[in-house]
Image: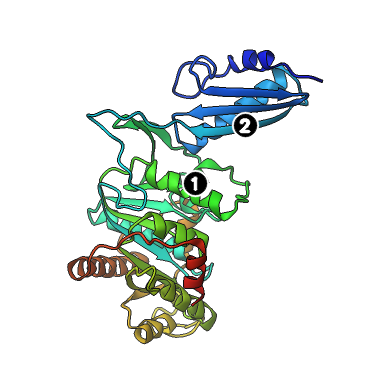
Amino acid sequence: MKIKKEDVLKALETITIAGEGKSMVESGAIKNVVTFGDEVVVDLEMSNPALHVRKRAEVDILKTIHEQVYAKAKIKVNISTAPQKQTSQSKTPEIKGKAIPGIKNIVAVASGKGGVGKSTVTANLAVMLSSMGFKVGLLDADIYGPSAPIMFDVANEKPLSVKVEGRSKMKPIESYGVKILSIGFFTEPDQAVVWRGPMAAKALNQMIFDAAWGELDFLLLDLPPGTGDIHLSIMQSLPITGSVIVSTPQHVALADAKKGVAMFQQESINVPVLGIIENMAYFTPEELPNNKYYIFGKEGAKNLAEDLKVPFLGELPIIQSIREAGDIGRPAALQINTTSQNAFLEITKNVVKEVVGRNETLAPTEAIKITTMAGCSAVKK
């Protein structure tokens, strides 16, 4: 079948972009339509950078053309973001690679390997900082395994678009006093994110720079495990105040944690390591409160911190309620006068202490400027 361009445009006149009130054709968002046989290419330019709005527009185009023009049409939708109009009164600043206005400290929480409780530690650090009176944001940068929406009981929420100084930005979801953004808000629960590095980096940049974070004392970055593309992209985009490494005591985790410390300490990266946190340090049964069982080894992360001459921020025991709290979306640090809350309080105080000391003695961190190859060699060393 040969599809006609005018039929496609007529169908697209029935679609309205969220928040604009006009059809795609009437608003000028449709920049071009090309048809060739049963193939259709639609070029769409949008002013709203929100990922969920862009995805909804693409789905609407596919569905409408299939229903109103040709059910077996082969459709490709190219979506671009409209350049922001600048006026003499208000020009859009270039902030990529620079500090984000309003955010005082950016702390990256990392781990050498997965499964050591990095996301659990990040979530509890965030709510503890908030309970101490700080303004806190959390960016779930673990693109392939986002967990913040579940841990904060906001898995069904979707960020809205808001206008900030004439620009459309994503409004973070707020829970327990923490502003949160995660790729998990833009995907279905059973949907796997199968992206190459550049695509993942682009999504992260949107959540960093196209978000209305407002005034924050701390922005915590929950990084993916390991050392790779996402880590380099983040550090190329943002001046990280400092990093925190999470590890369990066993040798296999410590070996990877050591690599994580080495990554941040590379000369080309040079992000201060605020310290190491030991998770799953020991287990104490309820019926034997005076006993400690070092299931994964004793003081491994503490000894590693001493060997690497970086601060030891504290230890977290294996407590069933910490896991349960994460599963139901209420971080354990909110549980008043419990062992878990006291442990997170001690660790959070140490993190704040190290951030204050770092800011008093070191110059602000700069976003790194490295090529892809340089970044790879830096991580390998």
Q: Position of 4 compared to 267: left or right? A: right
Q: In which quarter of the image is the N terminus?
A: top right
Residue in the image at 22% along x and 69% along y: 362
Amino acid type at circle 1 is Ala
In the image, residue 77 sits, relative to residue 104, either above or below, namely above
Q: Mark 2: which amino acid?
A: Val
At numbered mark 2, what does the secondary structure look like: helix, strand or loop? Answer: strand
Report the number of discs.
Answer: 2
Residue, disc 2: 77
Q: In this view, does 217 lie to the left or right of 276?
A: left
Residue 228 x, y percent position in the rendering: 52, 64
Give the mark nearest the N terminus, 2 or 1. 2
Query: Which of the two residues, 235 or 91, is positioned nearer the viewer here?
Result: 91
Q: Where residue 357 sits in the image (x, y, percent)?
A: 21, 70
Question: Which residue shows up at 46% across the image and 17% down it?
Answer: 21
**Crowd tier of the residue under label 2, counting other residues whose Cα lies within 10 Å: few below 14, some 14–19, many 20 or above:** some
